[in-house]
Image: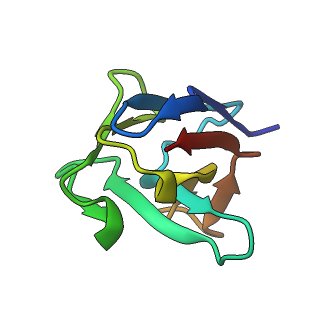
Amino acid sequence: QVQLVESGGGLVQAGGSLRLSCVVSGSTVSMSVMGWYRQAPGKQRELVAIIINTGSGSTNYGDSVKGRFTISRGAGKNTVYLQMNSLEPEDTAVYYCHARAEHVIPRLTYWGQGTQVTVSS
């Protein structure tokens, strides 16, 4: 069974930093794209950052985190990190790891169970 194992959430003061990690376990397929989304109470889930997991490693960020957050691939397969700096109370949300394989049929899409990030003012 494929699982996305997330770690690194927690409580931090405004201006602080956290690093999230996500590892895909139980899959024999390399994921094409990995990334993070977040959902705050009463709001829709939104893009935080995604990275192409093969080749170019190109990235895409949500507007609200550009310049503060950095997504990167791990040395091992199917691993992604999110370095979050200059955290703001508005960053408080549940952060979900996302992974998908677009080069297989049918395409595969997975979500982690979420890790809470709380930024105090």
**Residue 63, image x, y percentages:** 30, 72
- Using the rendered view, name the quadrant where residue 15 is placed: top left
Q: Nearer the viewer, residue 8 or 34?
A: 8
Q: Nearer the viewer, residue 22 or 93?
A: 93
Display colour scheme? rainbow
Q: Residue at x 53, y 71 (%)?
A: 46
59 shown above or below 72: below
Q: Residue at x 67, y 76 (%)?
A: 43
**Residue 42, image x, y percentages:** 74, 75
**Residue 30, image x, y percentages:** 49, 42
Q: Residue at x 60, y 41 (%)?
A: 117
121 shown above or below 6: below
101 shown above or below 2: below
Residue 22 visible? no
Is 26 placed left or right of 86 in the picture? right
User: Which quadrant is the N terminus positioned in?
Assistant: top right
Q: Residue at x 57, y 54 (%)?
A: 98
Is 54 placed left or right of 9 in the picture? left
Is 95 placed left or right of 86 in the picture? right
- Using the rendered view, name the quadrant where residue 23 is placed: top right
**Residue 33, image x, y percentages:** 43, 56
Q: Nearer the viewer, residue 118 or 45?
A: 118
